[in-house]
Amino acid sequence: MKKLNLLMAVSFDGFAARGPEDNMNWTGYEDKALFKALTMSSPHPLLVGRRTFEQMPKLEGRELVPISRNPELGMSLERAAELYPGAWLIGGMEVARAALQAGLVGLVYQSRVPAKLKEGIPWRPLEKFLQKQTKTDFWIDTGVHVRVHGVNRGS
């Protein structure tokens, strides 16, 4: 079964967000160009946690599907993975952790952003789900460093 792709921006000092209400403006133009290039390549909607969904603007050419444990507020993570194999899961941190714990993620695209947040929601708790060796590590023309990780089975 094809799994979801997780796409997460991580600050230079290891944070995935400033906090639950973060608008992600710290990621900058370069990361947003990467995000757009990767997510426009998918025929599937973008899967996003309900709280993040409520904060996100409309994204041209892409549909956002809210993920929630409450069926009145969004689709379950398991159902979304079943309906949209290969889709991009774009956050937030809680839904990313749940997807990794449930074994629903095949690859993690970690965009390393030069910004320093100094505090916020740390990326480190998700590292335990990742294979120690990155599958690929590259820079794109916009200047963003991308690490693609496999996911440990049985995490």
Image (cartoon, grey):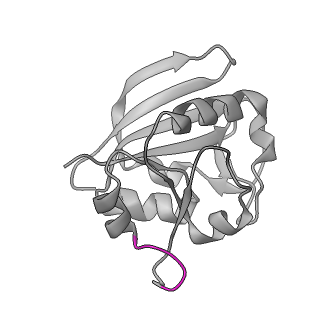
* Left or right, 106 with reference to 11: left
* Left or right, 96 with reference to 119: left
Magenta stretch containing residue 73, yes or no? Answer: yes
Q: Residue furthest left?
A: 1
Give 136 or 38, whichever is nearer the viewer: 38
Magenta stretch containing residue 98, yes or no? Answer: no
Give 45 or 116, whichever is nearer the viewer: 45
Q: State the residue at coordinates (60%, 23%).
A: 145
Quarter where residue 93 is shown? bottom right
Residue 20 appears at what percent x and percent y?
A: 70, 66
Residue 6 appears at what percent x and percent y?
A: 46, 46
Q: State the residue at coordinates (76%, 58%).
A: 22
Residue 106, relative to residue 29: is it above or below? below
Residue 134 appears at what percent x and percent y?
A: 38, 28
* Left or right, 25 with reference to 147: right
Residue 122, relative to residue 75: is it above or below? above
Residue range corresponding to the magenta coloring:
72-76
Residue 26 appears at what percent x and percent y?
A: 80, 42
Q: How many marks?
A: 0
Q: Residue furthest front?
A: 61
Give 42 or 97, whichever is nearer the viewer: 42
